[in-house]
Image (cartoon, rainbow, N blue to C red):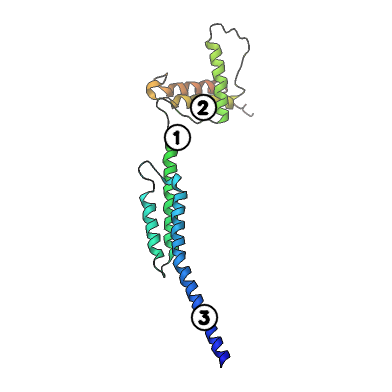
Amino acid sequence: MVLAFIVIFLVLFVASVFSSVKSVIERRIPRKLEFLSDELIRGAQSHLGTHEQAIPVSVAQNNQTFKRMLSRPAAALHPALWDLGHAIGEECWRNGYVEGLKVGAQPAGTIRIELSAEELLQMSWLAHLGFQHMMPNYRGFEVYRFNGEADARAGARAVALLECALPKSQRPFADITTQLQTRDKMIGDWWVKKPEPALA
């Protein structure tokens, strides 16, 4: 009889302790999660903040929604947490994109053009030869020529890229098409395909 009473007492004691511990944990977990969400936003604030506001509206709203969900024991937290993460990522991306545009913005009065290494090499070589022939004291006897039709067309294309990048009002020629056609004709006239001999 005494033994049964002791066993029942121990079972009730363990159940009471378990219930108390569970209640404490259930109260502390939401607080901890709420603290973690605030710390998450604080850690990303250097990427989230703008001149207008420290925390974007969408992030603050999703954080409040997540905190409200913590107060509901049966509420599913994952969707609210996903929304909060998505809002943080979206705002970080937006701020980075805007800053990237500012850094990569083209300064006034400048022109940017993309050239391959081969095109840049062609331009540097043509520019060097052009500079030499523009100097009154140049007395060079060496002769440089394109090593074939493909090389000549690559050089003409590199020159055309630079000419086309200039604003129309600043181009040295009124009609750039004429210059392109002239170079193309020079190449075509020199590297004319010889007609194949007729077979008897």
Report the residue at 48% width, 74% height from top: 20
Q: Secondary structure at mark 1?
A: helix
How far apart marks 1 and 2 lie (CA) works out to 30 Å
Q: Residue at x 37, y 22 (%)?
A: 169
Q: Where residue 200 appears, x then y in whole percent?
A: 64, 28
| Crowding near the residue tagged with mark 2, few <14, some 14–19, many ≥20 C-alpha atoms within 10 Å | some
Q: Amino acid at mark 3?
A: Phe
Residue 185, can we see it?
Answer: yes
Q: Judging from the image, what secondary structure is the residue with disc 3 in?
A: helix
Crowdedness of circle 3 by 10 Å Cα count: few (<14), some, many (20+)? few
Q: Nearer the viewer, residue 157 or 104?
A: 104
Residue annotated with mark 2? 157
Residue 186 at x, y = what percent?
Answer: 52, 20
Point out the frontmost of discs 2 and 3: 3
Quadrant of res 76: bottom left
Check disc 1 and give the amino acid type: Val
Question: Which label sits on residue 103?
Answer: 1
Determine whether, in the image, residue 123 is placed left or right of residue 51.
right
Residue 168: percent from the left, percent from the top? 38, 24
Image: 38 above or below 94: below
Query: What residue did someone put label 3 on?
Result: 13
Of labels 1 and 2, the one closer to you: 1
Can I make out residue 193 in this image?
no
